[in-house]
Amino acid sequence: MTSIPTPAPVIRMQGIKREYRMGGRHAKGDDAIVVRALRGLDFSAGAGEFVSVMGPSGSGKSTLMNILGCLDKPSAGTYTLDGIETSESDSDTFAYIRNRKIGFVFQSFNLLARTTALENVELPMFYRRREKGVKPYGTRERRERARAALREVGLEKRMDHYPSQLSGGQQQRVAIARAIVNDPAFILADEPTGNLDSQMSLEIMGLFQQLNRRGKTIVMVTHEPEFAAYTKRIITLRDGTLVSDVEGEGRDAGRELARWKSDNSLLADGKIPGVPPEGGA
Ligand SMILES: Nc1ncnc2c1ncn2[C@@H]1O[C@H](COP(=O)(O)OP(=O)(O)OP(=O)(O)O)[C@@H](O)[C@H]1O
Ligand SMILES: [Mg+2]
């Protein structure tokens, strides 16, 4: 029997601490108030995982997201992303990691308003030009890749729409296409359904599940246990420490969406189960 080597984790955090020193720059010793937002966190995730990060307000989720997203550095500990030790990186490497290794999806979509869906998705590919040793994409290649990403999220018919001409769920799809277009090591989503109604939220969770089935690694912060139930693994923070790490329910958003739609179309048609239509039978 041949043994399959375990792949290196995409994310490996060891002993991560983040302290905020308050009280002004003159505060020293006992005068300084230190907020310990993360208190020595160990967390690893491998390729193909779909993890949700939960925890009460103030538990350290955003602090963790900022470090995961290379927007902030820890006060102590090591964070290796796709084999790159981030704590030793300079700001150029940090920018490179953010652009190429991480696909960000935010609660508020963060699309450029005067720019079509297609152009929004092309944007991350422009930054490649500035990287040393990286072949920039040509115009045609950029366009092709952006189109493919939009097709992947089911928006092939909306490529030339501006954000204001799209529903919230469609805007979030554009943001997801933008997040995957550079083929990042993982997608980092911060409350991606926070601004969406229930149907759109289910659609977005279904899309994440589809992408995950195709091998994309996803880390998602959410307040809602209902949405965490669609992920494969749930970690929970409390007071800056990891207090639980369990398997998710793995509910199927696509199936629930189909059921939801059929129930609602029955209601819309007046065909409420058990109630004969007016003038009928
Ligand atoms: N820039 C900062 N300066 C000082 N303290 C901070 C700073 N940012 C966060 N904190 C503190 O660190 C702790 C963790 O905050 P964090 O924003 O990570 O929580 P959270 O889990 O994201 O909460 P929420 O669910 O409300 O968004 C809190 O006690 C918070 O007050
Ligand atoms: Mg937060």
Image (spheres, grey):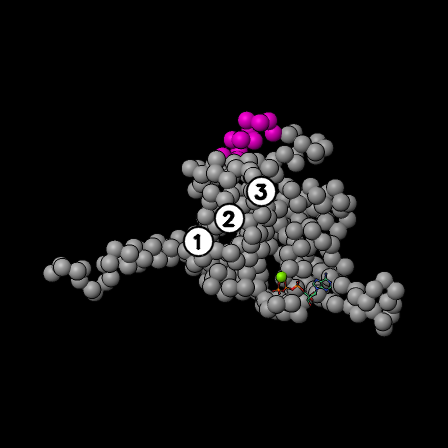
Among the two numbered marks 3 and 2 on one chain, the one whose residue lies closer to the N terminus:
3
Q: Which mark is residue 76?
A: none
Identify whether 79 is placed above or below 249.
above
Decide whether residue 95 is among the magenta residues.
no
Residue type highlighted by circle 1: Met
Among the two numbered marks 2 and 1 on one chain, the one whose residue lies closer to the N terminus:
2
Q: Which residues are magenta?
A: 137-147
Residue type highlighted by circle 2: Gln
Where is residue 129 shown, x and y percent of the image?
67, 32
Secondary structure beneath label 1: helix
Residue at which label 3 appears: 112
Q: Main secondary structure of the magenta part?
A: helix
Residue 264, located in which quarter of the rendered image?
A: bottom left
Q: Which mark is residue 172?
A: 2
Where is residue 107 shown, x and y percent of the image?
55, 54
Secondary structure beneath label 3: loop
Residue at which label 1 appears: 200
- Picture quarter with the C terminus: bottom left
Q: Nearer the viewer, mark 3 or mark 2?
A: 3
Report if the beta carbon of the residue with label 3 is closer than 8 angstroms to ligand 2: no
Task: Name the residue rendered at 87%, 70% in the picture.
Answer: 29
For mark 1, does the 10 Å Cα neighbourhood hold few (<14), some (14 to 19), or many (20 or more) residues? some
Residue 260, located in which quarter of the rendered image?
A: bottom left
For mark 3, does the 10 Å Cα neighbourhood hold few (<14), some (14 to 19), or many (20 or more) residues? few
- Left or right position of 226 against 190: left
Residue type highlighted by circle 3: Leu
- Left or right position of 99 against 74: left
Label 3, label 2: how far apart the Cα atoms are: 12 Å
Label 1, label 3: how far apart the Cα atoms are: 21 Å
Task: Name the residue rendered at 64%, 30% in the picture.
Answer: 136
